[in-house]
Structures are given as structure tokens and as C-alpha cells.
Image (cartoon, rainbow, N blue to C red):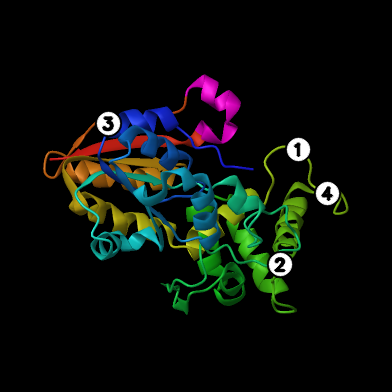
Amino acid sequence: MRHIPVLLNEVIEGLQLQSGMHVIDCTLGDAGHSEKILEQIGTTGKLLGIDADPEAILRAKQYLYKFDAQVIFVRNNFINLKTIVEENKFNPINGILMDFGWSTPQFEERGRGFSFEKTDELLDMRYGSNFQFTIFNLQNPNVSDLINSLDGQELEKIFREYGEEKLSKEIAKMIVEIRKEKNIKTVGDLVEIILKVYRTKLKTDKEIPWVGGLHPATKTFQALRIAVNNEFGVIEDVLPQAIEVLHRGGRLAVITFHSLEDRIVKHYFKSQENKTIKLINKKPVVCTEEEYKNNPRARSAKLRVIEKL
């Protein structure tokens, strides 16, 4: 199944694409946005597609095969945007897209523990295991490393700040207690801990599986994914690079799905307004009712577009 790109028409309109332009898709995924971009920039245009996930690169190549030499594929984390541009001598850059959402194949088909429904998978959740990060003084940790190494206060902070989980303290405490007896390695291990906390809090039968409404593991899994990939730190680092490498008059389009992501983007753009950039839309663009009906995950998407002065 191919991922459906959100706010596709709004992105194309916001970037003001023309024939012959050079565009970067920093979050290539299944290349839904990139395919449309390539159609707009014509046979003389070029696209640089970046993704840290090796499987995403392979899938994107399949979808974009007809564009052949117009596309440069780079397996890397977009936090290295400036270096990637320099190494590939990709200029002038007329447009950049960053889509901070996750594609369905990444959750359902990668086998890295992204989905709390895949109980047998190991808790990994990293974009790509070959990229080196130091997070919480751990070198390139996966999610299992985090929940088996961090203390209760650190775990609680992750769940509260990145997932806005109301039972963050209770879940962190339970994790610390359980890991005294065994390492928490699989999705099922963590989900059962979270369900146990919720069942205790709500005083429900411990043998009844969770049904209906938002699954209790949703926010905790989101928080751990953000933490292990340093997602917010990456956004803070890449935005200045994007503006730096953009050609004058070039545009940057950013799609966020999390309120904290959007806050980072909004504040940075505001700090640069009338200095290095101008805002194309003062308020974020959101999906139409029609798009929401066809693609419910677009509900939380917010698009902000700027132009380099």
C-alpha cells in the first residue's frame, strides 16, 4: 500500500513550481509529493530526494522510475541538509519540502516496533540504525535501550512532554518496577505495562483487552518515537540550514502533525520574518473536509510556507 501524501495541492501551490526548477524533498517517503513536484517542474527540472530509511529510498525509486536522471536519491538524515546539498552540488535551490509525518508503510511494514499493534516486534523505532546520534548520553539507542536505561523521572518527562500522556508518572514507575525482573524488549512487553497502568487507574477487569477509543499506548509510543529520533532537535537544526541553502525567492514548505513541532516551526519563522524570509501564510493551512474524509490522518496536518528574501 502506498502512502497518501497530505495537503498535496496546497504544497504544490505554496511552492509556486515552474519548469526547470531545482527542488528538495527532505522527507521522501513513498514519493507522493515528489511525483507531483516532478510533474510540475518538467523534464528540465531536478529533484533531490532525502530519506534516512533505506526501504523508503527503494520504494521511492520504484514510484519515480519514469523520471530517471531527474532525481538524485540520498540516504541520509535531513539534519545534514547543507552537507548533502554541497556533496551533490545541487543548486540553485528553488524549493524545499519537509513533511514531518509518518507514512503508513513505516508503521505497518518495517518491523521496527512503530505500531503498538505489532506485539511481537522488537522495540526499535529508529529511522535508520546506521546514523549516529547521542541521546540521553546513549550512543544511537533504540527504544528498548531508552526504557531499560533511563531513570523514572527521565521517562516521565519524555511521556509528558513529547506525548502529553496524563499517566506519564504512573507508566514510568511501572516500567522501572517491571525492568527489575526482566528487560522490556518487545512491543507487547511495553503495551502490557501501559494497559496494566490504565486498567488499574480505571479499575477495569485486568483480563479484558482494550477496546474502543484512543488506545492507551498511542501517546507513549509517539513520545518514544520522537525521543529516540531526536525529532524536535532535528527540526530546530534543519530550519536554518534550509533557509541558508535556498536561492533568493525560493520557497520552503513545512508540514507538521504535532503541536510541539508546529510551535518550533512557527517561532523560528517568526524570528526570521522580514530579516531573511517573508511569511506566505500567516496562519497554517489545514486540510479540507473532502481530504479529511478521504484521508483521516490529514486532520492534524498543518502547512506553513515562507519565501527567502
- SS category of the residue bearing label 4: loop
Q: CA distance from mark 4 to mark 3?
A: 50 Å
* Quadrant occupied by the C terminus: top left
Decide which of tag 3 and tag 1 comes sooner along the chain. Answer: 3
Q: CA distance from mark 4 to mark 2?
A: 18 Å
Q: Circle 4 is placed at which residue position?
A: 209
Q: Which mark is residue 186?
A: 2
Horizontally, is 248 left or right of 45 in the view?
Answer: left
The three-letter code of the residue at mark 1 reads: Gly
Asked whether 298 falls inside the magenta stretch, the response is yes
* Quadrant occupied by the N terminus: top right
Among the 4 quarters of the image, the one containing residue 123: bottom right
Q: Position of residue 140 (x, y in %)?
A: 48, 74
Q: Circle 3 is placed at which residue position?
A: 16
Residue found 82% across the figure and 47% down from its top: 204
Q: Position of residue 52 (x, y in %)?
A: 46, 61
Graded by Cα atoms within 10 Å as few (under 14), some (14 to 19) or many (20 or more), the crowding at tag 2 reads: many
Horizontally, is 285 left or right of 247 in the view?
Answer: right
Q: CA distance from mark 1 to mark 2?
A: 23 Å
Q: Which residues are magenta?
A: 288-299
> How many labels were placed on the picture?
4
Q: Nearer the viewer, mark 3 or mark 1?
A: 3
Q: Position of residue 44 (x, y in %)?
A: 28, 41
